[in-house]
Image: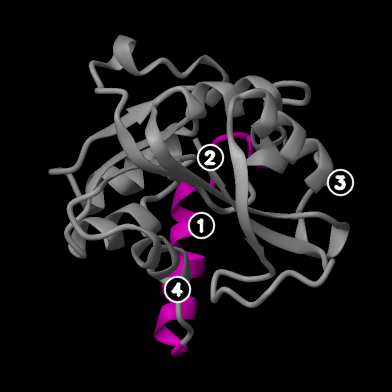
Amino acid sequence: MSRWQELTGGTSGQDYAARFAALARGGQDVHGEARFCAALMPAGARVLDAGCGTGRVMIRLAELGYDCVGVDLDASMLAVAQQRAPELPWFQVDLADFESDLLGIAADFDLVVAAGNVFPLLTAGTEATVVERLAAVLRPGGLMVAGFGLDEAHLPVPPGITLAEYDDCCAAAGLSRVDRFATWDAVPYDGGGYAVSVHRR
C-alpha cells in the first residue's frame, strides 16, 4: 500500500480540492507548477501528469494549450478531476505498474511532471521502478520534473526519499540532471527542505 493510501484511505479527493479552492479564493497562486512547466516547454507539447490528483496542474496546462494525460491511483481524486474536465484523459493506475501501451497511450511525452509530493508518498521501495517507468515514456530529450518535500516540515509523512537517492534513480533510468530549484517559482535550491528537480532523458 502506498504511503498516500495509508495517510488518506483513498477518500480525500473532495477535501483536497476544497483546500486548494479556498487558497485560490484567498488570492494565493495555485498555478505555480503549471507555470513552471510552461516555461520549460512550448504550448502543444505532450505532458504526462504523474500523480495528477484532482487535476489542478493538468487542467491549467490544458487551458494553456498543452496535450495532457493524467494518471493517479486514488479514485476519489480522479473523480474530482473527471468532474472538472471530463474531456481530458484520466487513468487510474499505480505508477509502479504504469505502462503506456497497456493504456493505449503513445510513449512520446515531451514532459513528465510529478508534483504534490508524489515520490515521498509512493509505496516504500517502488521509487526506482516509478522513475524507470516514467522515464520510459519520455521522448529522447524529454524532461521529467518532480517537486517534493525532504523533511517533516514539508511532508505529511516521514521523509521517504532523499535527493541523492532520487538522482540515483534517475541516473539508473537514463536521466541526467538539468537543474534544481527550491520552489516552483524557480528560486535556486539552497539545501532546504523542498526541491524541484529537472532531469532530461
- SS at badge 3: loop
Among numbered discs 3 and 2, the one appearing first in the sequence: 2
In terms of image quadrants, where is residue 76? top left
Among numbered discs 2 and 4, the one appearing first in the sequence: 2
Among numbered discs 4 and 3, the one appearing first in the sequence: 4
Give the magenta-colored segment's residue range: 7-27
Using residue 3 as the reference point, say whether residue 114 is left or right of it: left
| Residue under pointer 4 | 30
- Examine the structure image and report whether residue 23 is included in the region drawn in magenta: yes
Q: Is residue 142 above or below residue 102?
A: below
Residue type for callout 2: Thr
Dot 2 crowding, Cα within 10 Å, few <14, some 14–19, many 20+: some
| Residue under pointer 1 | 15
- Examine the structure image and report whether residue 135 is included in the region drawn in magenta: no
Using residue 88 as the reference point, say whether residue 195 is left or right of it: right
| Residue under pointer 3 | 158
